[in-house]
Image: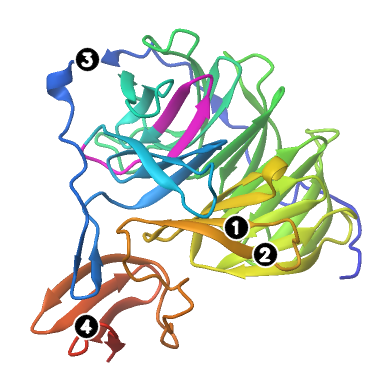
Amino acid sequence: MASVAVETATQAVVPAPTVTLLPTLEPEPVAATELQPALEPLAQVNGVVTQTGGLIKGLAIDPPFVYLTNGPGLSILDASDPAHPRQVGQITLADTTFEDVAVAGGLAYLVGPSGLWIVDISDVAMPRLVSHSRLPANGKAVAIQDTLAYVAANGIYTNPPGQNGLFIVDVAIPASPVLVGSLVVDEDTYAVDVQDKLALLVAGGVHFVDVSDPAAPKSVGFYRPEFGMVQAVAVTGDKAYVNAFNDFSVFDITDPGAPARLGSLPVNGSDIAVADDLAFVAAGGVTVVDVSDPTAPTGIGWYWAPVTSLELSPADNLAYIVVGQSGLDVVDISNPRRQTLAGSWEIVPGGPSWDDPSITKPAGVPGRINAVTLANGHLFAVEADHGLWAFDLSDPASPQPI
């Protein structure tokens, strides 16, 4: 791809977001009697997988363990044998769907409509709830740095309506988190990444936020794409990687107040992970982008799967990807031009998967199904992007779209 001219990433002028300090968080009681029952076993009926746990949205890794938000709880997998990941622990926390998880220092931090949950994972077989604190908005994403949790949250769907923005929580004492600062923005927030004194907050575009004083975070730069909204960000060194509608861009953030767009590639993605000179973009599959020349990012490899989230373990040459609602794929990335499936974990062991080479994926059938129901020998499936699908189950081993 041809290089693009350097430009300052201030395509849209927005009012400086206001900073609102909120009261100290009041941790919810965590008596054992308040915990929900364990996740119910998953079932396979007539070749159709039913999932009672919930949608897998969040993913974090601390090799050899993989942490997945599984609907209302947390599932922990041992991936020391990448070909055979196995579940070693789980905990059900709330009657909700968690949006994201981060792990650090023997603790897992989960965010969702009910706020911030901190779980002790020092014993992966027996994860234990440490605290639950409500935020003034629904948590969408979380990043941990030192003793601070950075939470991107939306308030539009709360009752009463809350605030959109970045909420910084002191978790030095995990049992008693304290909200120390916040940055309120006008638009819904979806993602956050942090490095040193800079946080990137996705809210329509990308806010470049100075967090050198956690009690008073301030937006020092802003980028809004020409089309659509920003969906994912990652920051490494003096570079930021931003994914918007059909646009993967690399920014020089040496001066966060004037981020400069260096180059771009037409890729539409929902998540980004970066290792050395390679960026891995969840884009209907995994697109590998060579960013060694930031003015000319180039796609060099692709792995098909209905990917919603991904994490990398560069030391092991492995990528861990959430495959819609079906489970987890472990992908060998030692040859980024030709990635191969090293192993997988299915929500229902032995259940059907579009990644199984013995199963032919019908043309046009979606990869991410949010809900299913059975009626009169037919399966009706709701898919996020394309609506309602009907399948003929007269041959249960080979459901066919109608």
Residue topped by disc 3: 29
Q: Is the residue marked by circle 1 packed among few (<14), some (14-19), or many (20+) residues within 10 Å? A: many
Q: Which quadrant of the structure image shows residue 345?
A: bottom left
Q: Secondary structure at mark 2?
A: loop
Identify the residue shown where x is 71% and y is 44%: 314
Residue topped by disc 2: 339
Q: Secondary structure at mark 1?
A: strand
Identify the residue shown where x is 71% and y is 22%: 197
Screen quadrant of the N terminus: bottom right
Find out whether residue 323 is within the magenta segment: no
Of labels 3 and 2, the one closer to you: 2
Give whichever of discs 2 and 4 has the lower sequence position: 2
Q: Observer-nearest residue: 86 or 6?
A: 86
* Disc number for residue 331: 1
Q: Are marks 1 and 2 in contact (CB under 8 Å)?
A: yes
Q: Are marks 3 and 2 in contact (CB under 8 Å)?
A: no
Q: Which quadrant of the structure image shows residue 148?
A: top right
Q: Amino acid at mark 3?
A: Pro
